[in-house]
Image: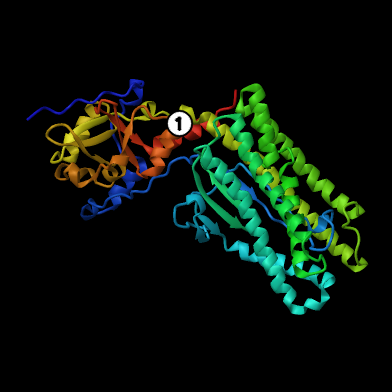
Amino acid sequence: MRPHRLYREPDRDSSSWTKPYDPPPTARAYHRRRPPSHCMIRASHRATTPPTPHRTCTCTTLREPPAATPPDSTERRTAVADTDETGERAHKRSGPGGGILMGRPFGVPVYVSPSWFLVAALITWVFGDQLDRVLPDLGPARYLVSLFFAVAFYASVLVHELAHTVAALRFKLPVRRIQLQFFGGVSEIEKESETPGREFVLAFVGPLLSLLLAGAFYLGMELVDPATVPGVLLAGLMISNLLVAAFNLLPGLPLDGGRMLRALIWGITGKPMTGTVAAAWVGRALAVTVLIGLPMITHTGILGAGTGANESTGMNTVMDALLAAILAAIIWTGAGNSLRMARLREHLPELRARTLTRRAVPVENATPLSEALRRANAHGARAIVVVDAHGDPLSLVRESAIASVPEHRRPWIAVSTLAQDLTDGMKVSAELSGEALLDHLRATPATEYLVLEPTGEIYGVLSTLDVEKAFVKAMARPQS
């Protein structure tokens, strides 16, 4: 038999490896309480890795414009914001809050959140009230027309999101999913654009499609009588899409216009972080402007919101203030999230598998746990790798599994009974770093990973706990 193949020791300060392996104090106290018969219980396989940043494009629908009123009626306006914030982790099937899977256009799953039904009911009620004034002969059927409008409007929101999705796929950027929810739609794009030009195009295609839809609805209005149901529906959809496009083109994050501004500054300075900071602060200024200015404009009637019955003025004022507050909060939060995600990406290269790896000692299957720990302490190692007779790695002994065995039982427990078999996903190259490292860890969740040299030699063991600590430390460091 060949001797065990020697592993290369991680290039780290030796002082961090000389501490003998010892369970944490809480684990030692736990061992004193537990009877020996429970020493074989294995630890959980759950892994917690820092989130991989990915862009989300959020279309936020607030209130719908009336079908027969001009587009300057702000009290019924529609606002759509494309944000660059952290989306929730989603799987191919809907996870928590994922909603109902409606289809997979271009291979991207589209979900409808349960909250969409709430906003659809709200749109149906508001638009139905407007229809009663314009087409009083409809009677109760106006609510069926209003429901159709709500579905058609969200279909146009989906087209807006699909424009971002198609552009992202064209640029080889993975899209996790599209979700229609209470505040519109969300396209989760997992990676950053590589160039400012692509960033500009990716942001612009959404408003462009909304403008094209508005133009198509306008052409349709020319073919029908405006005093009919089709004419009213086409007018409402045209106004809604115009507002969607116009609002998104405002130059502040998290709106599409803010991302276009970011791309321009990025292209001029060559620094994406500079563009993000500038566009995010413009977005925050825009949020304050909306919070203060929107109620004032609608109250003065500049946009036509001041007309109507006197008894409804108080309600309109409250609704306008609520609309402004929600819209300002969305913009302010999205701008802050954009800054946070840019900072996260800036620190990702500091996460390197080679520097985070723990020294490991190789042992065979039948080795008692006490002997394996003695060897680990003698070599200043903090991890144990189970190998076969030729020195090839078979499994990892998890730290939590070691801590679950009382010290007096360790001479009778073989490491193989505590080991977790290695899969291909649990083998990490020592050269991985940054987002590529996090992508690998997310693809195969585990608590420990075997780190290998490009030659196949054992380099050590990477713990997700160490990755989290390094990630938090990097994020807490003040920016230069």
Any part of residue 184 in sight = no
Mark 1 lies on residue: 434
Front position in the image: 467 or 346: 346
> Where does the image place residue 423, in percent across and percent down from the top left?
27, 43
Q: Amino acid at mark 1?
A: Gly
Q: Residue at x 66, y 62 (%)?
A: 152
Kind of element beneath mark 1: helix
Position above or below: 236 against 460: below
Q: How is the image coloured?
A: rainbow
Of the 4 image quadrants, the one containing the C terminus is top right
Image quadrant where one finds the N terminus: top left
The relative height of residue 100 versus residue 397 in the rendered view (above or below) is below
In this picture, residue 295 sits left or right of residue 403: right
> Residue 141: x and y, percent?
73, 77
Seen in the image, is 155 located left or right of residue 452? right
Residue 393: where, in percent of width, then height?
Answer: 21, 35
| Residue at the image position 28 percent from the left and 45 percent from the top | 401
